[in-house]
Amino acid sequence: MSASDLCNAYLEALNRSDLDAVQAMFPTDGTVVSPLYGEQNAHEFYARLFSDTSNSKTTLLNVFAKSEDSNSVALHFKYDWTLANGKLVDFECVDVFELTKDRTKFQKLTIIYDTAPLREDFERLKT
């Protein structure tokens, strides 16, 4: 599977809220760095994210890769995120993935977006 195929499968799994499929894209020691959740194990991150989510919709805008055999790739997409409390927040973000050595999974994900417009709604989930 190419990096582009893996990225497309990732967005599709997010759209389906398929926790098992997303977790399977990361090794057990995979990590995610998120502006809202901090740095944590990828499997734990997605379990937490999906518990805070009632619906997700992504719209791919751009894919950035140095080359097809690069060990990193970035996705620029619009994310329509319906929180567990029903509040819809939408924003553009960039997900930067580092692939495993065999290029079959994501070793690390760094998520980049401006949290200011949605932080208040997100914090309400925790109260």
Image: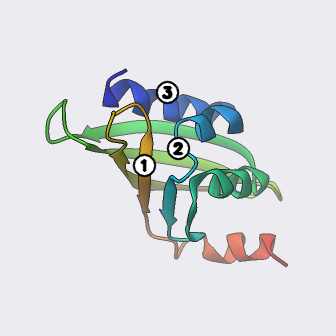
Q: Nearer the viewer, residue 101 or 7?
A: 101
Circle nearer the N terminus (3, 1): 3
Do callouts 2 and 3 mark residues in contact (Cβ within 8 Å)? no
Residue at horizontal 72 percent and vertical 76 percent from the top: 123
Q: Which residue is mark 2?
A: 27
Check residue 79 in the rendering and tell me which mark sits there, or answer none: none
Residue occupying the point 50% across, 59% down: 32
Query: Of the residues under marks 2 and 3, which one precedes in the sequence?
Result: 3
Task: Measure the C-alpha gap from mark 3 to mark 1.
Answer: 16 Å
Q: Are marks 2 and 1 in contact (CB under 8 Å)?
A: yes
**As rendered, which of 116 and 101 lies closer to the eye?**
101
Query: Mark 3 and 1 residues: CB-CB less than 8 Å, in contact?
Result: no
**Residue 9 circle label:** 3
Distance, label 2 to label 3, CA atoms, is 16 Å
Res. 12 image quadrant: top right
User: Could you tell me which secondary element the residue under label 3 belongs to?
Assistant: helix
Query: Circle 2: is it few (<14), some (14-19), or many (20+) Cα within 10 Å?
Result: some
Residue 105 % position (x, y):
44, 36
* Residue 17 at least partly seen: no
Separation of marks 2 and 1 at Cα, in angstroms = 7 Å
Q: Is residue 113 above or below residue 107?
A: below
Kind of residue sitting beneath label 2: Pro
Residue 36 screen position, x and y as percent: 58, 71
Mark 2 or 3: the one toward you: 2
Q: Secondary structure at mark 2?
A: loop
Give the percent coordinates (x, y) of residue 33: 48, 65
Which residue is more in the foreground, 70 or 118? 70
**Element assignment for label 1:** strand
- Using the image, tell me which numbered label, if any, was put on residue 107: 1
The mark nearer the N terminus, 2 or 1, is 2
Q: Quadrant of the C terminus?
A: bottom right
